[in-house]
Image (cartoon, rainbow, N blue to C red):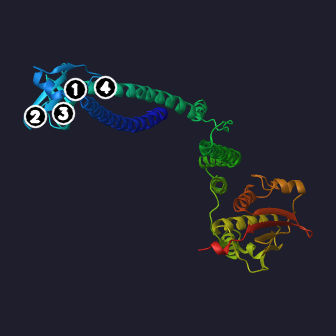
Amino acid sequence: MSLRLRLLLIIGISLTVLWSAVATWMLMDARQSLREALDSRLAASARMVAGLVAQFPNLQELAQSAERPLDIIARDGVACEISVVRSEVEIQAVSRTAGSPDMSQVALGFGTHMHGGKRWRTFVLREGHIQIAAADSIELRESLVRGIMISAGLPFVVALFGSLLLLWVGITHGLAPLERIRDLLSRRRPGDDSPLPKVKAPVELQPLLRTIEELLERQQAAIMRERRFTDSAAHELRTPLTGIKTHIQVAHLAAQRPGERNTLDAALSQADQGVQQLQNILQRLLELARLDGQSARAESSQADEAVYAALHALKAIYGDTIDQITLDIRSKPGPVQIEKSLLTVAVQNLIDNALRYTQALQPISLRIEAGEPGYLRISVLDHGPGLSESERDLAMSRFWRGSQQQAGYGLGLSIVNAIATQHGGMLELLNRQSGGLEARLTLLLADLTVQP
């Protein structure tokens, strides 16, 4: 069922029930008022006749000489009867409207009686020895009531159907903006993630439009992340896969020839290194994809704990080389607004990048200090070749490496920059005056008042 028809049924049925109840109430009240008015007319007619009869003093003589009641002319459908009361049991009619019922024995006041197969409404008034009775046909009364009900009910029915028609037109006009949005969305091709064109809509539909636009933006961002991940994987995995395939072919040939044990071992070793390289690249790519697809969590961590965890993880890779790193904590570090695992990954990548471009026995300094108010700064200072201004702009791009001779994948600084940006921080690459590079990671301090 369409929304338009549903609204029409709900509002239409409600209006019909409400106005039908009101109309029934009004008609019943009008019917009762009409009956009371007709009863008042009967009583007024009887009193008027009584006043006229009082002017004839010889009424009893007329009753004694008359063989049958005299006929009188009826007016406005009211029957009338004039009687002389001789005793409590003897009442003689003097005059009566032709065709009217015999009302000489009818009780005083209002009553309802059958005469000639018809029901009559009567009113009897007695003043001294004169009794006046007035009556009118109940069938005539009901006919009059039905006429009033039809006269009042027909316009009501016409007004009700007219209201439903106007209601249908109003609902159609009111739902026109929603209909435009539906038509706009139905005409879009599957996979079309372009923004919605401007649609004139009332304020009630603006949240719906904003929600649709946000969904389209999220869809577009998800598609862009998927394409970026696919392009990155295709770009960076092609070379290791080619090397692995080549080394496996060499190993296969060496295995078929006697005396090629050394060649076989070397080819398998090179293939194993290629597999390890693929594993590392995929791990970095998955880290970047995870950072692109999630929002920052409201967690905090201690910067020094994350630094020690990063040094411990790198110790297993670089061995004693890690001892050339000196830790310089210049101020008591407070908690930063970032989860510990991500901060550990960021510091680990900064140290790993410094170790790759610093010659052996050259010192590397890791400094923790207060930055701008509300921020903490973690800096890694090396004695490597440094970067030119143009290279610093490219260094945080994915898969860019300052020297192709150095091992690596060009993803470390990209990961650190993504982590910093996601948590309201910043990564800066600065050349040192004494030579080398300073990688400065600035992070937002956690608000201790909101900590549990």
Residue 130 has which mark?
3
Identity of the residue drawn at 72% across and 64% down: 349
How far across and how far down the image is residue 218, in percent?
63, 46
Is 222 located above or below residue 65 in the figure?
below
Q: Is residue 312 above or below residue 262?
A: below
Q: Do residues under tags 1 and 4 come within 8 Å of each other at their CB atoms?
A: no
- Residue 173 picture location, percent across and down: 57, 31
**Label 2 with label 1: CB-CB less than 8 Å:** no
- Badge 4 marks a residue whose secondary structure is helix
Q: In terms of secondary structure, where does tag 1 sit?
A: strand
In the figure, 351 relative to 262: above or below? below
Q: Amino acid at mark 3?
A: Ile
Label 3, label 2: how many angstroms apart (C-alpha)? 9 Å
Residue 247 vs residue 130: left or right? right
Q: Separation of disc 3 and disc 4 at Cα?
A: 32 Å
**Residue at the (11%, 28%) spot, across then down:** 92
Q: Amino acid at mark 4?
A: Leu
Mark 4 highlights which residue?
144
**Mark 3 vs 4, N-terminal side:** 3
Task: Residue 381: name its quadrant.
Answer: bottom right
Q: Secondary structure at mark 2?
A: loop
Mark 1–mark 4 Cα distance, whole angstroms, equals 20 Å
Few, some or many C-alpha atoms within 10 Å of disc 4 (few <14, some 14-19, many ≥20)? Answer: some
